[in-house]
Image (cartoon, rainbow, N blue to C red):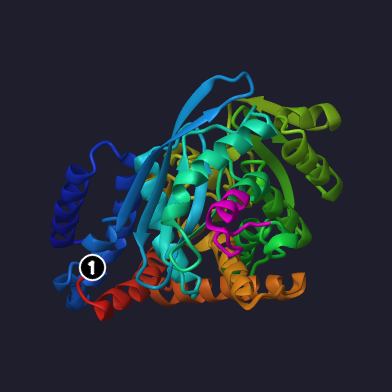
Amino acid sequence: MSYAYQQQLDEFMAKIIAKNPGETEFHQAVLEVAESLIPFIEENPQYKANKILERIAEPERVIMFRVPWLDDKGDVQINRGFRIEMNSAIGPYKGGLRFHPTVNLGILKFLAFEQVLKNSLTTLPMGGGKGGSDFDPKGKSDNEVMKFTQSFMSELFRHIGPNTDVPAGDIGVGGREIGFMFGQYKRLKNEFTGVLTGKGIDWGGSLIRPEATGYGQVYFAEEMLKTRGLDFKGKICTVSGSGNVAQYATQKATELGGKVVTLSDSEGYIHDPKGIDAEKLAYVMNLKNVKRGRISEYCDKYPEAQFFSGKRPWEVKCDIALPSATQNEINGEDAKMLVSNGCFCVSEGANMPSTPEAIEVYLEKKILYGPGKAANAGGVATSGLEMTQNSMRLNWSREEVDAKLHGIMIAIHKNCVKYGTESDGFINYVKGANIGGFVKVADAMLAQGLV
C-alpha cells in the first residue's frame, strides 16, 4: 500500500476506534476490509464523495435489552440481549443470533459488518445484521433454555419480521433454540411467517440448512483448488471445532476424497491419523448434538486417536486447513506452522478465525486462502433459500437445495476471482471478497440517496 493510501487508512481507522472504543474485534474486521477498499474507492470517486465506507461501518440501528428469566431452582437470572441491524440497502437484515458468555457489542458489530459483505456476495437480496446474548446454553436444561429464549423473544419480536429482519442460528443457537424462539414469536404476533431461518423441516425449514455452512466451506475450497489443478482426493485435512460447521465440513471433505484427522472443542483437540470416517463422524454427531459431551471422549471410543488438552490442531501436518470454531483461532505463529508443515489451502468456516498476522502469512506465501465472508457464506445463502421457500409456501428437495448452494458458492468464487486477481496471476481472495461484496451494497446505497 502506498504512503498516501496508508495515511488515509490510518485516519479512517483512528475515527472508527474513537467512535467505538474497546471494540477490538470490530476494529479488526473494519481494518481488514478498509485495507482492500481504500485504493479501490480512490479509483471510484463516487463512493468517496458519498462516504459509503464510513456509512457501511456505522450500524443503521443497535438494539440492546434486558433478558430476565427463572432457572430450575426458581432463582432470577438476568442476561443482556442484542440485535445489530447493520445495513438494509439490498434487502431485510439477515444474520445469526449467538448465545455465548463472550457475546458483547464489539463482537456482534464485527459479525454484523462482515455479514453485510457476505450476504452481498451470495447474490441474494439480503442485508446484514447480527445479534444474541451473553447467555450460555451449555449445561442448561431444556426448560431453562426455553424460559430464556421466550424472554429473549418477548423483546426481540417487536424489532424483527419477514420483510424487516430475519435472524438465524449461530454459536449456541441450534434447532432447539430456534424452535423455542419461533414458537414465542408466533404466539406474540399471532402469525406463521418465515421470521427465523434454521427452522425444523416440518414447520418451514429447508433441507440442507444444517449442512450448508460446512458444505459451502468445502465447495469454496474445491473451487480454489481447481485454480491450481488440484482436488480433495488423498489430501490430509485439519478441522477445528466439533459443532455444526465442523461436522458437515468433515462429512463433505471426506465425500470428496479427503482425510480429516482432527476435531476440537474449547478443551483441546483430537488427532486421529486413520481419519474420521462416516462411522466415527456419526459418533461425534451423537456425542455433540445429543449427549452434549466433550471431544476428548472420542479417544475412549477410538483409542488410536490422541487428545491434546488446551491446544489447537494447527500443529498437525496437513494439506488443507478448515478452521470451523471461532474468531482469532489461528494466530501468526499458527499460520507459519501450518505453511511450514505443507498446508497450501485454508478455507474458513468460522467468522474471522485468522488474525491479521495469520492472513499476512497466507498472502506472503501465496497459498490458497478463502476468508470467512466468502468461504462460509453457504449458511446464510441457504437461509436465503429458506426465506424464498417460505415466501412461496413450498419445499424444495434436498438435491435442489444442494445444487443451488453449490451454484452460489461457485458464483461467490468467480466474483472473488474477478476482483482479486493480481497482475502476477495470484488470486487475493481477501481483496476479491471485500471489493466484490462492497460494490453491490455501495451501488444500492448510492441509488437510494442519503439514508
Identify whether 225 is placed above or below 273. below
Q: Position of residue 300 (x, y in %)?
A: 82, 26
With 50 as the anchor, is 303 left or right in this view? right
Q: Quadrant of the C terminus?
A: bottom left
The 10 Å Cα crowd at callout 1, few under 14, some 14 to 19, many 20 or more, is some
380 vs 363, nearest the viewer: 380
Residue 152 visible to an observer of this rendering = yes
Q: Is residue 3 magenta?
A: no
Q: Amino acid at mark 1?
A: Ile
With 400 as the anchor, is 190 left or right in this view? left
Residue at image x 56%, y 68%? 384
Q: Which segment did they paint magenta?
A: 182-199
Question: For mark 1, what is the residue?
Answer: 52
Q: Quadrant of residue 407?
A: bottom right
Q: Position of residue 371 (x, y in %)?
A: 47, 57
Residue at image x 56%, y 53%? 185
Q: Quadrant of residue 431?
A: bottom left
Q: Is residue 194 magenta?
A: yes
Kind of element beneath mark 1? helix
Residue at image x 46%, y 74%? 125
320 vs 164, nearest the viewer: 164
With 443 as the anchor, is 299 left or right in this view? right
With 398 as the anchor, is 160 left or right in this view? left
Identify whether 418 is placed above or below 17. below
